[in-house]
Image: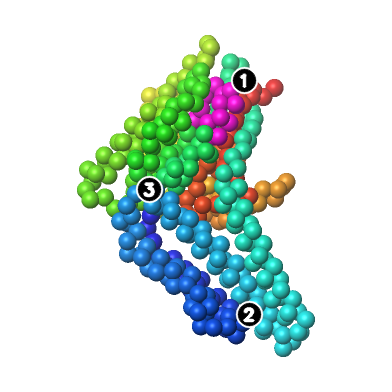
Amino acid sequence: MKFYFLPMLVGLLFIIGPDIWIYLKIRNRLGNRYLRLIYWLPAVFFVLFFVGMRFFSNDLPDYKFMARITWILWLFALIYIPKVIYTIFDVAGRAMIGFCKTLGLWLSRIGAGIAVMLVVLFVYAAFIGRTRVHVKEVDLAYRDLPEQLDGFKIVQFSDLHIGNWGDYTRVMRKAVELIDDCRADMVVFTGDFVNNFSSEITPEIVDIFASMDMPRYGKYAVLGNHDYGDYSRWRTPEEKNINLNRTKSGIEECGFDLLLNNSRTIAVRDTSFLLVGVENTGKPPFRQYGNLPLAISGVDSTLFTVLLSHDASHWRQEVLGHRFIDLTLSGHTHAAQCGISWGKLHWSPSSWIYEEWEGLYRENEQLLYVNRGLGYVGIPMRIGMEPEITCFTLKRSR
């Protein structure tokens, strides 16, 4: 976890500006100096927190401590984002009073109402939205799908970020139950099993995922950008490499066949299809480990082909140039962990960064599906983009 100067400066401005404005409004109501000192305690705490993270974030002791840090970030958001919104409306209201007193007063009241709603929303997002896993069923129709694959079920899940959950494993257990209930022919995981450290894959985590029913045609996984340990400072390259190898071993102990720039030919009745898995490839600044040409070298390109690639931007970047790849399954975006999905209204801040950020996309006969993921990064909450398990059914177009 790395904290840079500009985000730290923005964080400090978030603290100081609204706190000064609100303090000037209520200082006479605070009474004695002790209440005034108490008022400033959160500001002092968060200033010290952000300054400390700027200098010591690479030396955090373990993943459990980092999980606690994410809750401090949530507390910061819970307190200060509503304050910022209220301050913006209140300042605008004060400016309007000279022109229209009624409008000025209402702007201040609207700001207070929005602030209260945000507090409620953030509490919901952390304690309900973050853990409310749902199964999404998606039919994928292909004109040239072999008849033997008609009705074949693939379950995808992604982006566990296990370390961020700390000792809270109930969501993982629930996810395994939901996956088993899908009665899939194959289960795939599309990267970011851990947040940074192989130690996140504890014996309990291994037991949970190893207990998953083994589908007839297996469980497969690829690595995501977080699985390589790139977000921590290592004493030596060897230490980082040991961590990566242990992460790979841990995923395999959970019962997954880990695909590392290679492929498997899956025999189904009297036909076959191709399952390809690449290491992390996509948009900078994320490091590139994937090698699609290597993964598909020597394969039978006439077979129906499914590609597992963590970063959805890889699809437009390279995959579309290989027309025999029929379906790409990705994750990575988390759909920004917030957004709106209501009827035809489908939006998330993630759309500002990624052209394909959540759900199903088609380019001619090639399909991409971007899974929202089960876990989270940064602030532990999800608003409108709850954790997802996707159950695909392959269909032959009539």
How many numbered circles does the render carry? 3
Residue at horizontal 53 percent and vertical 31 percent from the top: 176
Which segment is the magenta one?
A: 174-188
Residue 182 part of the magenta-drawn span: yes
Given the image, on which type of amino acid does mark 3 rest? Tyr
Give me the disc on residue 150.
Answer: 1
Q: Picture coordinates of residue 329 (x, y %)?
A: 52, 35
Asked whether residue 232 appears in the rendered view, the answer is yes
- Crowding at dot 3, Cα within 10 Å, few <14 / some 14-19 / many 20+, comes out as many
Compared with 267, 102 (above or below) is below
Q: Cα distance, mark 3 to mark 2?
A: 41 Å
Packing grade of label 1 (10 A; few <14, some 14-19, many >=20) is some
Q: Quadrant of residue 116?
A: bottom right
Residue that label 3 marks: 63
Three-letter amino acid code at the position of disc 2: Val
**Residue at 58% over, 19% down:** 149
Q: Please state which of residues 248 and 345 is positioned toward the viewer in this rendering.
A: 248
N-terminal of the pair, mark 2 or mark 1, is 2
Image quadrant where one finds the N terminus: bottom left
Cα gap from disc 1 to disc 3, whole angstroms = 43 Å
Q: Which residue is mark 2?
A: 91
> Which residue is at a point 67% across and 24% down the rendered structure image?
397
